[in-house]
Amino acid sequence: MGTGHGAEAVAPAPVVRMIIGSLPGFAPYSRAFALAPLEFACNMKSVPETPWHRLPPEEVLGLLGANPQQGLEAPEVQARQRSHGPNALPPPKGRGPLLRFLLQFHQVLVHILLVATVIKLAVGAYTDAAVIFGVIFLNAVIGFVQEGKALGALEALARALTTEATVLRGGQRQRIDARALVPGDIVLLASGDKVPADLRLLGVRELRVAEAALTGESLPVEKNADPLAADTVLADRRNMAYSSTLVHYGTATGVVVATGSGTEIGRISQLLAQTDVLATPLTQRITRFSHWLMWAILSLAALTFAVGTFVHGKPLIDMFLAAVALAVAMIPEGLVVVLTITLAIGVSRMARRHAIIRHLPAVETLGSTTVICSDKTGTLTRNEMTVQRLWAGGAGAEVGGVGYAPQGALSRDGQPLPVLPPALHELLRAGLLCNDAVLREDGSGWRIDGDPTEGALIVAARKAGLLEAAEATAQPRLDALPFESQHQYMATLHGGAPPRLYLKGAVEAVLARCSHALAADGSRQPLAADAVHAQVEAMARLGLRVLAFARRSGQGLAHIGHDDVAGGLEFIGLQGMIDPPRAEAVRAVQACHTAGIRVKMITGDHAVTAAAIAAEIGLDPRATRERPPRALSGRELEALDAAAFEAAAADTAVFARVTPEQKLRLVQALQARGEVVAMTGDGVNDAPALKRADIGVAMGITGTEVSKEAAAMVLTDDNFASIEAAVEEGRGVFDNIVKFISWILPTNAGQGLVIIAAILAAQPLPILPVQALWINMTTAVLLGLTLCFEPREAGIMRRPPRRPEAPILNLELVLRIVLVGVMLMVGATVLFHDALARGLSEAEARTIALAVFAVGQSFYLLNMRSLRQSMWRLGLMSNPWIWVGIAAMMGSQLLLTYVPLMNTLFHTAPIAAAEWLPVLAVGLTIYAVIGAEKLLRKTLEARAAKASGGKA
Ligand code: ATP
């Protein structure tokens, strides 16, 4: 089966060795050069000092056995992959498993219990000591396993986001997973890319790279390909692009000199330890709360200890153990662990719905989102462009057909256009030549590789009979200025007769550079800008995305810069394309409105197009197709003063031709009004707005690596509906956290009250420390954890967003916690004393008191499956784990009660079957009382809503 590893490795090529041997500057590396290039490359990790920056490009290429025109061939790539391994950093060294396990014991409560163990040993109660220690140990194991699972889930997500790289292999330009890169690969960099490995630059066009990840310097550094002095320090090596740094501008070609842990960043990151990845503002708040609670409980324990010892004159050790029982009973140990697990489950649920969380706090913030600012193209629309209208030489034409299949005909006023007028022909040709996309047919239909906007232009040209290959042969491309959002145009220079420069882009950007226009017959005429604008308006009102085209002579030019297209161009015409709204986005926008979340469109497209699409999507509930929402353009925003800007940010639904700086200002203005803002972005310059937003959302498919780095969440399908889904999950996570807290606290409150009452009344303890430990551990793990799996509640997106500053528990829940705590305490105390009064032993009476907690909490769990609905409404089986948990809890209680070993260990005793009846009655009472309380509250709320609705 094997492919014969090693056998396929490319044999060292003597010719290449000869060429390298003759290169200048060879002498200092004679030891390394004694190897063939491939062997050398394979051994590169062992000679990391090779000063690639010192060598001229051809020497570097020779050393690496690389070919800048063809790239590596497939067999060679495979051989190098085998010897170098994947281009990936080793996972950051986190806390090792042993340390993580030992840290489970590093909690104040455990310290107290360890003291209690020592005291038990000192007084000769060896069994008790062993049991306490055993339970602490078991608790640590459970904590360790759960924490490990949560960490594992998050790590899996981190791996889900891969970096892609554009390489030249076998003469073909390809987009590949960056992990497959090998030394010697030729990599093409463009603005927005993350540099995928350490590269020696070979050719550079205005390349600026931000190297903060490596050098801490946040300002982008200008790069070139010239050799440098050998002692040039890392930060000054202008001819190198290092792995994990970000391309902010320009393009470049480079050859990979080091991959994975051999890269500069690889060397640093091995030194970095993983920080605490499981912390969010909420977990931090709750950790602080549980610390505070713990000290309060310890003070209370000290007080009861003092009262017992000094007021009631009880023995010191008894009272110490009673105080320990109190502390154990009241401190909610499981809280933080379960919270972490709930968050981790939320993160995986979001991932299943195409939203990858990069910063854990976003999980919580999502639930509080009040405004979502979304891009239009590709997020709210499908990004499947079809050119429908052309306009050139003062006359229009319609293009038939939909999608990328080049089938359809050109017509004018319903009549076919058998002969293309020269201006229309030139318009289509400009679209074909000034283009980086590729149209291809595979088994499942026609596809576009590259920008769909450009793909649509190829399809339109093909429909009129123009072919890419023929045009490219007649007018070969000499140079190009790639499209950058900030310029809003792309230009290409072509040879042939006559040489030409084509420009395409946003109407404003192109028209501003034109002095003349092409007449229908191909002659030159004065530019009638008003007529062009009127035509653009007409197309945009139909929701079409309009691109303008222009040209000039390319005579005497070998390269082009922005100066070459600054003015004096000849306007050719317009192409208008539809980009239908995503059906799921329409539904998601509707769902957001119901959930009290406003959606704003912030697009680089034309204001009229944006408004028309916004109307189709229903972005502004008051607007219609006939009366589209008002769109504010970037230029209009610019004219506003700070106060007016803030008001406009709040009141407007559509912003068009917005610059990245304005995006940032919009986020800030909305935040100043107290909004929690989710903002999408895909370009390099969107990074500041993404970072500033409460939740920066990047596009997984079309987004640049720079935007992904800056975002808190990445959409794997670029779809607006996934943001709405993540908000829904975020609300669900928060609900489950609230449910768990409201469920667990009564156990602690109830047990604590039972013990305090007993000590104050100088009565025997109804619950011993080991028993409290057992109950807390079993209820938290077997019952409480099942709440994390509770599905989202039905009406979750009909509620308004949660205010971020609102307390986790509202008054209603605090009262509920107290109510259940008191019911548990009364039930346990009354049944305990009743049992003693009937002559049962203390062990039997305690077993009954413990059963009250196990059964009572099981019933209360059913209440807490939803904060408002009854469990019957939710569906009894919508979370089967609840029943598994309750069955396990009952099983463990039966073991505790009837297994002799457990009786010895935990000081329990078997009880008669009839003793369970009053225990069940307590459980049922809790269920009924809380059920009634929920019903009452719902009725009151409904009445209040009706009253306010009636008034409105
Ligand atoms: P959104 O911001 O919603 O994604 P967008 O794609 O229109 O919308 P940009 O990518 O900033 O935003 O594009 C701005 C304008 O530049 C477009 O409206 C279009 O006129 C023009 N444009 C877009 N793509 C190209 C391209 N490949 N070549 C030339 N011009 C383009």
Image (spheres, helix red, strand yellow):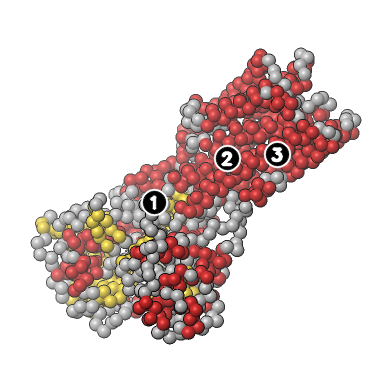
Q: Nearer the viewer, residue 74 or 361?
A: 74
Q: Residue at x 61, y 47 (%)?
A: 283
Q: Disc 3 residue type?
A: Ile
Q: Nearer the viewer, residue 919 or 814?
A: 919
Q: Disc 2 residue type?
A: Ile
The residue wearing badge 3 is 136
Q: Earlier in the sequence, mark 3 or mark 1?
A: 3
Q: Is residue 893 rendered to the left or right of residue 551?
A: right
Q: Disc 1 residue type?
A: Asp
Circle 2 sits in a helix, a strand or a loop, which is it? helix
User: Mark 2 against mark 3, which lies toward the viewer?
Assistant: 3
Q: Residue 320 in the image: x percent, y percent?
A: 83, 35
Q: Residue at x 63, y 32 (%)?
A: 779
Mark 2 residue crowding within 10 angstroms, few (<14) / some (14–19) / many (20+): many
Which quarter of the figure has residue 855?
Answer: top right
Q: Earlier in the sequence, mark 2 or mark 3?
A: 3
Q: Is residue 292 rendered to the left or right of residue 685?
A: right
The residue wearing badge 1 is 717
Circle 1 sits in a helix, a strand or a loop, which is it? loop
Q: Is residue 571 rendered to the left or right of residue 709?
A: left
Q: Earlier in the sequence, mark 2 or mark 1?
A: 1
Report how far apart the C-alphas of labels 3 and 1 lie in the structure: 46 Å
